[in-house]
Image: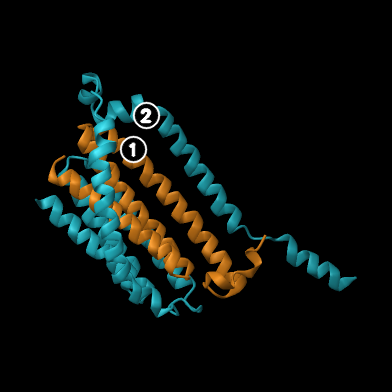
Amino acid sequence: MSSEVYGLFFVGLLTAMVGIYILLGYRNLIRIMLGVEVISKGITMILLGAGLYQGRPDFIQALIITFIIVETIMAAVMLGIVIISHKIHVTLDIRRQSKLKG
Amino acid sequence: MATIWLLVLTFLLILAVGFAKDLLKAAVALAAASVFLSLVLFYHGAWVAGVFELSVCAGLITVLFVSTVSLTKDSDQNEESKISRFLLPAFLLFFIGIDIFAMKWIEGHLLKATNAPIAASDVTKGFSEVFWGARTTDVLGQAALILAGVFAILALFKRTAAKPHAAEGGKHE
């Protein structure tokens, strides 16, 4: 494995772990969304590393584009939910989102 | 070597997302991280993915984040517990340890297992051939997902016009 592919896998995994930390450690809804985006950056790096390792950059490019579109739609819908939730609760603290309880 | 430096810069900006107290600064740091990631993609010949990363992730998503931050400005958005921010460096060391073990496992087991030979036709296919030919289902899925996203946003921000009329009717009665 070349140093570039190793670097992509290493930094990608580390980025995903930092994203999971942001997701679990913070309680602001917007920051949680930023955590999800950070995880997706890590996944993009891992995908690119996998493509370079297999020697199929065009194939992995198609997958990265699909992933970016999924990420964007998810971000748009979730930020919409954040705005609606803020209108109802006037807070972004996830612990005070009591009306979300099933 | 350029890839390694770009990745280090990307990771430092990702850490800034975790450390930044202001949400606006965190969103801008994420956008800057996307710019460096798109440079990595350009460097490795993934031009189209690089353009998508630069325009959509560094552009559109940042606009969405900044809009959400400004629309929710009257809330307690910057009141975060300091513990999470202070614990991040300690957890980072822990994550690096896990990452080193994970990389050893990936090198030793996973990559050896997936070392199957690739068909020469797969390697020589160009991007447009792969995207529009081999991954047609993905394109259809993307179109369906975009439609689902549009309908979800419409449903979320739908103005209920019936409610004020109902209230007026109640008053007259």
3D distance between C-alphas at marks 2 and 1 = 9 Å
> Which numbered circle lies on residue B121?
none
Q: Which residue is mark 2?
A: B135
Q: Chain of mark 1?
A: A
Please give the name of the residue rendered at 25% of the width and 47% of the height, measured from the top-left corner: B103
In depth, the one of A58 and A5 nearer the eye is A5
Q: In which image quadrant can residue B166 be found?
A: bottom right
Report helix, strand or loop for mark 2: loop
Q: Quadrant of the C terminus of chain A?
A: bottom right
Tell me, yes or no, whether the two marked residues, 2 and 1, touch with CB atoms within 8 Å.
yes
Q: Position of residue B39 (x, y in %)?
A: 19, 51
Chain displayed in cyan: B
Quadrant holding the N terminus of chain A: top left
Rendered image quadrant of residue B9: bottom left
Q: Residue at x 29, y 71 (%)?
A: B89
Q: Residue furthest right?
A: B173
| Rendering coords of residue B160 (x, y %) | 68, 60
Q: Residues within 10 Å of mark 1 (few under 14, many from 20)?
A: many
Q: Secondary structure at mark 1?
A: helix
Let me know if residue B49 appears in the view. Answer: no
Residue type highlighted by circle 2: Arg
Q: Position of residue B61 (x, y in %)?
A: 38, 57
Indicate the quadrant where residue B94 lies: bottom left
Q: Residue at x 20, y 38 (%)?
A: A52
Give the residue drawn at x 47%, y 70%. A28
What chain is the orange one?
A: A
Residue at mark 1: A63
Q: Chain of mark 2?
A: B
Give x and y (percent) for residue A66: 37, 40
Question: Foreground residue, B42 or B2?
Answer: B2
